[in-house]
Image: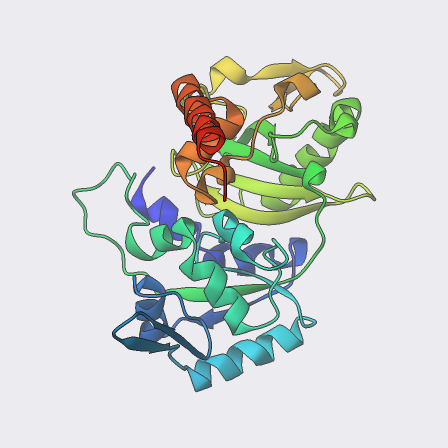
Amino acid sequence: MKKEQVVNCQFSVWYPIFKQHTIKSLILPLPQNVIDYLLDDGTLVVSGRYEWSDDETTSTVTAPEFPEFTSKVLEAINALGGRVFPKLNWSAPRDANWIALNSSLQCDSLTDIFLLFKSSDFITHDLTKPFLLCSDQDSPDPLVNYELVLRKWSELIPGGEFRCFVKENKLIAISQRDYTQHYQHVLKQEEQILHAIQAFFSQHIQYNFLDEDFVLDVYRDSQGRVWLIDVNPFGEVTDSLLFSWEELKSCQSILKILLWFPRVQEGPAFRCTTSEVTVQPSPCLSYRIPRDFVDLSTGEDAYKLIDFLKLKKSQQEEEEENPPQ
């Protein structure tokens, strides 16, 4: 994965090419003072004033104001129907939806967007080290003009999302996007899903992107139509989901024959979660609460669970010995 490939996967680069096949969106330049605010490690205050006090002092923090930028964002939100899905050049704050009141990435104000962005490691990665895993580290980093992307809010059913891996302009693999859940219709409609995605790729995507190797996220709606959702670099910075990057890069190890196509031609490997037994916790769960609690809830660390049970037992014994008066 080269730095140029990462640059080509910026939203403002691919959106004009595939505008007819994706969700309506608006792009706003991100002012430097807004970037500085997003990277500020201080108290998270996204609007108004916040006061707290101890026995000796009272402190007040006031959220910074960006009147011109706020006006442009509000205008864009209204133009997109009043509800939007926000992201930066590459990433959306998917790891921060837990902090929103509706546990969703749906936003109707700049305050909503700031809350998600300032709570997201994905956004921080975009702003600080977008070329971290590139192989050409000796070359200078390309200049990045950061942008706020606002996408018209659409209710997408997770079971309709798929990640497609393209190598040398060939669609080599398709993975269920939300691999943590089992969707019965995906397994039952595998042939139709494959056919629809392959047709969409060959008609609208293949040979039209700036690189030969890339990853695209698509959505197949209830009518069977396929939409482009995002374009990502072909490399470790992108989650390989139900595949491994080792097999994706070797390419030949995952190609198979799709017998339902005329004249029997090579097609992509397709993987989905096949049963409830293989359902997993969401990988974004680790961003929500301390890792120790995640380990306890998922059974990842048996020693932590034992320590936790010992602690609970000790607390119960203390309460029995010293009952409340």
Nearer to us in this view, 316 or 204 = 316
Residue positioned 34% across, 37% down in the render: 1
- Residue 176 horizontal/vertical position (percent): 63, 31
Q: Vertically, is 183 above or below 85?
A: above
Residue positioned 60% across, 35% down in the render: 177
Task: State how many labels appear.
Answer: 0
Residue positioned 50% across, 35% down in the render: 283
- Residue 124 horizontal/vertical position (percent): 35, 54
- Residue 249 horizontal/vertical position (percent): 41, 24
Residue positioned 30% across, 39% down in the render: 133
Nearer to us in this view, 244 or 298 = 298
Nearer to us in this view, 158 or 252 = 158
Q: 265 left or right of 254?
A: right
Q: Vertically, is 52 above or below 215?
A: below
Farthest front residue? 325
Q: Is residue 157 visible?
A: yes
Nearer to us in this view, 256 or 188 = 188
- Residue 138 horizontal/vertical position (percent): 16, 43
